[in-house]
Image (cartoon, coloured by chain):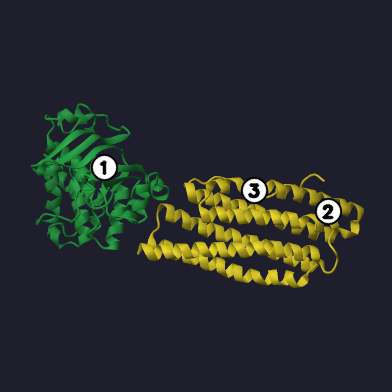
Amino acid sequence: MRESFDRELQRLEAEIIRMGSEVEEHLTQVTAAFVERDAVTARRMIAADEAINERRIQVGLDALTLIATQQPMARDLRLIAAIMEIVGELERIHDYIKGIGKISLNIGPTPVLPTIAAHMPEMAETAREMLHLSLKAFAERDKELALRVPAMDDKVDFLFNHLYADVVAYVMENPLGTTHANSLEWALHNLERSADRTINICEWVVYMVTGVYREMSMGEYESPPAA
Amino acid sequence: MSNVATYSTNGGPYAIEAQDLSIYYGSFRAVKNINLRFPTHKITALIGPSGCGKSTVLRAFNRMNDLIPISRAEGVILFHGKNIYDHDVDPVEIRRRVGMVFQKPNPFPKTIYENVAWGARINGFKGSKTDMDALVEESLRDAAVWDDVKDKLNQSGLSLSGGQQQRLCIARAIATRPEIILMDEPASALDPISTLRIEELIQELKKNYTILIVTHNMQQAARASDYTAFFNMDADRAGYLVEYNQTDELFTSPKNEMTEQYITGRFG
């Protein structure tokens, strides 16, 4: 009884890690596609979202089955709660990836601003690293690591603010470029939110390990930074 | 009994309290050094593997262990500030004020009415027939079995279903107007529907009584109690208290690794 329960828990945990790795890769790929105007990769990222959604639902249903059939308690219960929450965050991060892919197609062949091309990959790399470390903390039950990751969001926010200001400056100089600028802001916003979602993952890892839920996220950007 | 009433602290935060309680059967120490107090008008579940002494502890609170000649209690159980094991305390009075419901429904082979009236009579109820009728009805209502039996009060208690019999036994316990009700696996012999009805009933009863319940069923403890005490057996086979906390805390984030192992099904 306990053995099959453990096996199923391990299987769900492994599925989270696999999904997470895929989301990590897609963060990098969609950003590269965005700055390089690579429509093929952008389409592939959009198409990949459906499978991620299905896998998220399956993990959620399997976790519910475990709750119904095994009546998990304590550490097991907290692991299942973390699995259900984290899989939701991964799915949402992939929605942002899909969003960036769609914006990329909407922009068409127009090149993005040089500053975006120069710095958006760095922003994506930081968000990817945050996701990677949060999942490492999950797999290794590493509370300390989970507590450290959110500080990396400062770099994402810094780059976001910087690029946001650049885009605003671009609009001031090119009023006819507002639509293009708006698309760029949305893409940046999607990336910025991906990193925030990663902080939510860290919060659930801390809960899973300690039994105490602690808010670490600053929440969604409430107002745009001063240009 | 005046000896207990004298020390009354009615309405206090704790209905009954064990201090450094150990119980022996002959030279064998069955439970050791229990320190535990039970909040008034709350449901506390006692859980733990077989042989950990949880039923022995439960029975200590109304001196049911006295019925086993070789048993002996050390330490103190405070009820209204008085140690119920003091020589001047009448165990019959304690058992009236600390009622008990057992694992297997055990109605007397008498009418439903007599089953309830007996409890009151043995405890010195001196009212009229009308008073007794009212007490029987009220007790049966409080035990959520009145609607099932009101038209057949003169039929045998044994004619009822298992779940109804157990609620009849709860009515019998209530009829003595206790302050505390001890329940020793009250639903383990019942089907799932009857079990849920008993659990709902317990939730109702806590408005008027403090409830201590021994259960083997962890889900029942998690569902039905406010506080949970987890007992285990030590290397010397004596039961002891491992962890006591609010039920939601104990089942989601136990502090003790042994509690964690037990409630996640790794032993016991």
Subunit ID for the residue under disc 2: A
Percent position (x, y) of residue B17?
Answer: 26, 35
Element at label 3: loop
> In 3D space, how far apart are the residues under numbered discs 2 and 1 (Cα atoms)?
68 Å
**Considering the image in quadrants, where does the N terminus of chain A appear?**
bottom left
Element at label 2: helix
**Nearer to us: label 2 or label 1:** 1
Percent position (x, y) of residue A194?
Answer: 66, 56
> In 3D space, how far apart are the residues under numbered discs 3 and 1 (Cα atoms)?
46 Å
Q: Which residue is mark 3?
A: A219
Colour chain A appears in? yellow
Q: Which residue is mark 2?
A: A167
Q: Is residue A52 above or below residue A139?
A: below
Subunit ID for the residue under disc 1: B
> In this rendering, would A133 be left or right of A111?
left
Amino acid type of disc 1?
Tyr
Amino acid type of disc 2?
Val
Q: How many residues crowd around disc 1 within 10 Å: few (fewer than 14), some, or many (20 or more)?
A: many
